[in-house]
Structures are given as C-alpha cells and as structure tokens.
Amino acid sequence: MGLKSGEDIYYRTMSSLERHVATVVSITDEDILLRVHPGLPTGISKGQRIVISCKDLDCHTEVIGIEGNILTFKRIWSGKREYFRADDFLPVLATKAMYDPSCRKSKVFLGYNMEITDMEAPDETINPRLWKMLVEINTKLGLILERLQLESEGFTKGENKQVNISESGMRFIMNERVEAGDVLEIKLLLSSSPPLGILTYGNVVRVNNIGDGKYEVALHFSDMDDEVREEISKHILKRQRGIIKKQLQQIER
C-alpha cells in the first residue's frame, strides 16, 4: 500500500467522512498497527470497518484489536483513491451544457424536513390518536413535496442507467452523440432515504461508439462544490460497504 512505519496517516469509519490522525507503528502483508492520537475516537470497536488514507491510496480494513491507543487492523481491500469507484444503476439525465460557464453551479436537492417527527404526543392535553393522525399526514405530505420538487427539477425524467461513478467522474451509456471536450449537465437521483438529487457538470474526456446509436461516455466532474462531492462520496462508500459485505459473506461460506 505504500505505508511506512512512523508515517502519519488519516483514518475514518466507513460511515463517516470525519478524518482522524494516526501514526503507523508496524505493517505486514496481513496486519496494520496504528497509534491513534490524541486518543481513541468514540464509537471505534472490534469488527468495525475503517478506511486508512495515505497520499493517493485508500485501504479498507477491519478493526481486530484495541489496546490503549494502539489499533490493529486486517486488510480487506486497497487501491488508488483516484480509481475508488462503484458500479451502480441510477436515474441519469445528461444534456449538453449550452449556457454561460459562469452560471454553472453544482447543487444538492434535499428532501423536505418536516418538523413533526415524534410519534408520542408532546403533552397529555393532545389526544394521542389525533397526534398519530397528524404525524401520518405530515409524513405523507413530506413525501409528496419531495416528489414534486424532484419532478420540478427534472430528476424523475432521468433514464435508469448502468454507471461507474467516483468522486472525480463517471462512465455511462448515452443515446446522443457527444465529443471529447463537450460539457454535460448531469442530473443524478441517488438511492438514499429520502432520494437525493444531484446537479453537477462534467467535461467529456472519452467517447466510444458501441453501435446501435449508443455511446459509452467517460467524463470528469467540473464546477463541483464540497457538498456535492461529499454526497457522491457517501453514496460510493455505501455501495462499497455492500460489495465488501457480500465478499466477506462468500469467504465465510
């Protein structure tokens, strides 16, 4: 992986983007020992999945030992962060960006956050059955508003496509011919709960004519802010966790 004893690295849980600092104590083909500082973060336990980052590399590991501020990890998967990708099946709407580049701004379209979330009535003066009805109505209204917003922004018009996506770009099939150097407006509907709309832009770097009026397009994301990149990263991590879980289950059989 390129790790060296005495080297400072970053690590984080697979469910979080918050990074912590640690020093490599030792490394073998199977195990990695880290000295965490200033201390062990809360929530770290045996069996947990941890991503160790060094330069341009990511290493997916599992915590197998905790002794004071020394953590022992077992490797699961490692590779260049640039190629840290996930295969997925997502609604995608891709069109050529024709307008002024200064107007291009990536954006996350979040669902509505309705205030009534507790199934328990706030005080005994409110009829519990009436409160439950209000909560159910509120939930349904939130789902309707989320759907209307995604529809109004065009996210539900996307065609389900097989994609290969990373934080830096994506690859997918288009029915429209484009050329390397074209800029595409991309609308993605990520499979979260509730669904999350992503508007971003990408520079076409490669086009492969695969016949029947279809083109395999590879693009590099541009004009992307941190919020959009973070949501894409979370989605990729979720997909990778699913892949690793299946691989571990197959090994254990």
Image (tube, rainbow, N blue to C red):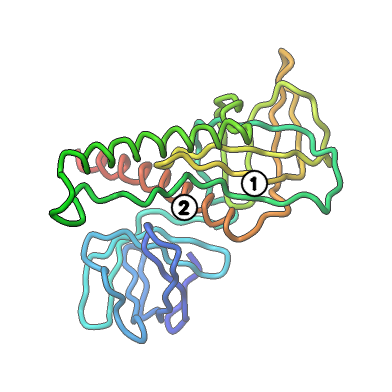
85 or 104: nearer the viewer: 104
68 or 72: nearer the viewer: 68
Q: Residue at x 34, y 39 (%)?
A: 139
The mark nearer the N terminus, 1 or 2, is 1
Work out which residue is located at the far top of the displayed protein and give it.
Answer: 212
Mark 1 residue element:
strand
Mark 2 residue element:
helix
Give the amino acid at mark 1: Gly
Of labels 1 and 2, the one closer to you? 2
Quadrant, the C terminus: top left
Q: Position of residue 245 (x, y in %)?
A: 30, 44
Q: Position of residue 202 (x, y in %)?
A: 72, 45
Q: Is residue 250 left or right of residue 206?
A: left
Q: Is residue 47 left or right of residue 232?
A: left
Q: Is residue 107 above or below residue 215?
A: below
- Measured in 3D between alpha carbons, the distance from the residue under mark 1 to the one under mark 2, in whole angstroms, is 15 Å
120 or 45: nearer the viewer: 120
Q: Is residue 200 above or below residue 16?
A: above
Q: Position of residue 15 (x, y in %)?
A: 37, 57
Q: Categorize mark 1 by other alpha carbons within 10 Å: few (<14), some (14-19), many (20+).
A: many
Q: Quadrant of residue 16?
A: bottom left
Q: Is residue 128 above or below residue 161?
A: below
Q: Residue at x 58, y 49 (%)?
A: 108
Question: Where is mark 1, residue-wise?
Answer: 169
Give the amino acid at mark 2: Lys
Residue 234: image tag: 2
Q: Categorize mark 2 by other alpha carbons within 10 Å: few (<14), some (14-19), many (20+).
A: some
Q: Residue at x 46, y 39 (%)?
A: 195
**Pointers 1 and 2 in contact (C-beta within 8 Å):** no
Work out which residue is located at the far bottom of the displayed protein and give it.
Answer: 38
53 or 144: nearer the viewer: 144
